[in-house]
Image: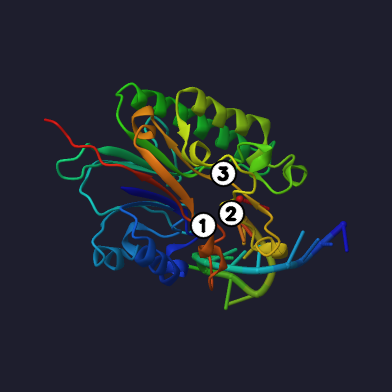
Amino acid sequence: MTVATWNVNSIKARLENVLAWFDEAKPDVACLQELKCVDEAFPREAFEERGYTVETHGQKTYNGVALLSRFPLEDVVRGLPGFQDEQARYIEALVAPKGMAPVRVAGAYMPNGNPVGTEKFTYKLAWLSAFEAHVKNLLAQEEACVFAGDYNIIPEPRDCHDPKAWEGDALFQPESRAAYRRLLNLGLTDAVRACDLSDGLYTFWDYQGGAWQKNRGIRIDHLLLSPQAADRLDSVAIHKTARGREKPSDHVPVTAMFHYETCIH
DNA sequence: ATGACTAATCGAATTAGA
């Protein structure tokens, strides 16, 4: 089972591009972020035609997340539990393939937080803290869980082309990185790092200044796995080709592949 | 010092992203 996360930067502006990738990568489950549209405006038919069940948590102009699956979805949750939030940044559901062990998948669009020293950064840290509390609750259930999304956190210096250039940015602040480490310390596995320790793995390249052409990127889109999900991880991929296309998102899809486990009931 | 890109908006510039 392949689980994807992708910040599409407007589903309406990106539809053709997104469908082209879906048709070649055929993810079983996909978490999309930054839809920038309300639920009614999401182009659900295009995905339903391709065999997906579509769940959205949209918002006008900003944010908005979707969870798409070729398997039935149960227990859909919209909004981060335990956190009063005006912004549509979280969706979660239980993916239940027939006769197979289910996997809980969460898709998050975590706050950017810039500029540091403002209420935007305070909101980022509060969001991360509520997310950590929710993860802790889910981990107690000992299920296979995938926490995918745009974390808006550069975990380590090797996750960006030029650490100096990101000093003072909310994505690379010590408090943001500490929040990410706390998630790992709860027992979550960074899927990409479990498979590939090399430098130069990026998931975002700014539209400005020829960042893509110069490969000045950052790794901020992550899939964090509960131990039960990590045990089933086979491989990961960062779909860089998506960034070189016409009218690309500034983020690329990241996928993790898991082996199926028979469900014994 | 500034703008660089892109998308959305009750617009003809501003806000937000990262």
Chain hosting mark 3 = A
Q: Is residue A79 visible?
A: no
Where residue A6 appears, as percent x and y from the top left, is 46, 54
Please name the residue shown 47% across and 59% down the image: A8
Q: Amino acid at mark 2?
A: Phe
Q: Is residue A20 visible?
A: yes
> Mark 2 falls on what kind of element?
strand
Q: Are marks 1 and 3 in contact (CB under 8 Å)?
A: no
Where residue A149 appears, as percent x and y from the top left, is 46, 45
Say left or right for A184 vs A211.
left
Q: Earlier in the sequence, mark 2 or mark 1?
A: 2
Chain hosting mark 2 = A
Q: Are marks 1 and 3 on the same chain?
A: yes
Q: Nearer the viewer, residue A89 or B5?
A: B5
Instruction: Give the distance between the C-alpha atoms of the residues marked 3 and 2, in whole angstroms.
Output: 10 Å
Q: Residues within 10 Å of mark 3 (few under 14, many from 20)?
A: many
Where residue A77 appears, as percent x and y from the top left, is 30, 40
> Mark 3 falls on what kind of element?
loop
- Residue tagged by mark 2? A204
- Residue tagged by mark 3? A152
Tell which tag, 3 or 2, sits nearer the viewer. Answer: 2
Instruction: Give the distance between the C-alpha atoms of the residues marked 1 and 3, in whole angstroms.
Output: 14 Å
Q: Earlier in the sequence, mark 1 or mark 3?
A: 3
Tell which tag, 1 or 3, sits nearer the viewer. Answer: 1
Q: Residues within 10 Å of mark 1 (few under 14, many from 20)?
A: many
